[in-house]
Amino acid sequence: MGMAVGAYVLQLIAADKTERFTLITDDINKPHITPQQYEVLHGGGAEAAEIAKERLSRRRFLRRSMLAVWGLSTTAAVSGSLYMLYPNLAGQFGSALNVGKKSDFPAAKPSDFKIDQAGVYYRQNAKTYLVHLSKDTPFLLSGSNLSDQLDAETVKKDTDGSYWIALYQRCVHLGCTVPFKDECVSFKCPCHGSHYNVDGEFLDGPAPRSLDRFSLSFNGGDVMVDTGTLNNKVPHPDATTRLIKVPTVQCSA
Ligand code: FES
């Protein structure tokens, strides 16, 4: 009798463990069901099959939802990385910009420059001073010395014999915006006094080089400034490299 009772108790403990295990795995793998549904499910029959089907479709729905969320987050992460690597700057500073028609920028000799009227024009969207030197500009160099220096300073010769330069507005000393001063026909930085000629060549002050310049091209009658391509390697000029003579009128400040 004692043995039989002991065996019965052991059986109960084993059954309890199995049920607990089933309930635990149910908790992890299955959506929550009501006690009534649980009873019917474990009793079998058509109702149980219906509930099982419903649970299966719920599981499928959950799995698909999780896959969809994962897919969306992955797509967003990949798109973000691609944007960081290849930002779309079309039409913005950093890309090639159409700054206007050639006829918007009448050429002039350096001594006749006036901001936005003759020879030098500001275009805010490109952060650029567009310089248009007339074909009779008196350069200090000639022959291959002139053509080599024009190339080195990103000066573009047009088919009508005039010359174009796209100067970046930023002072190469510490980054202030440099205004063009009509009174002394040159660029003078208000921050620490760096002074540049009409073509951006260094004149005096703390700037370590001449003004930087963007690449410039023509598209039919339009002037294109590529604000993503900068020549920042034009050194202080000397007697063998200076293109334009130094202005004689002093700037007021
Ligand atoms: S920032 Fe122009 S001179 Fe210093």
Image: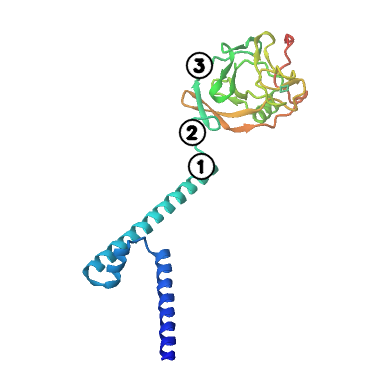
Q: Is residue 56 above or below residue 203?
A: below
Write down the quadrant of residue 139 in the picture.
top right
Locate residue 73 relative to residue 211 in the image: left or right: left
Three-letter residue code for mark 3: Asp
**Alpha carbon distance from label 1 to label 2:** 13 Å
Quadrant in which the C terminus appears: top right
Quickly name the residue at label 2.
90
Observer-nearest residue: 126 or 78?
Answer: 78
Sequence order check, earlier mark of 3 and 2: 2
Q: Position of residue 51 (x, y in %)?
A: 27, 64
Image x and y of residue 7, in percent: 42, 87
Q: Which image quarter has ligand 1?
A: top right
Name the secondary structure under disc 1: helix
Residue at the spot of label 3: 104
Residue at x-position 75% and y-position 27%: 208
Viewer-side label of 3, 2: 2
Circle 3 sits in a helix, a strand or a loop, which is it? helix
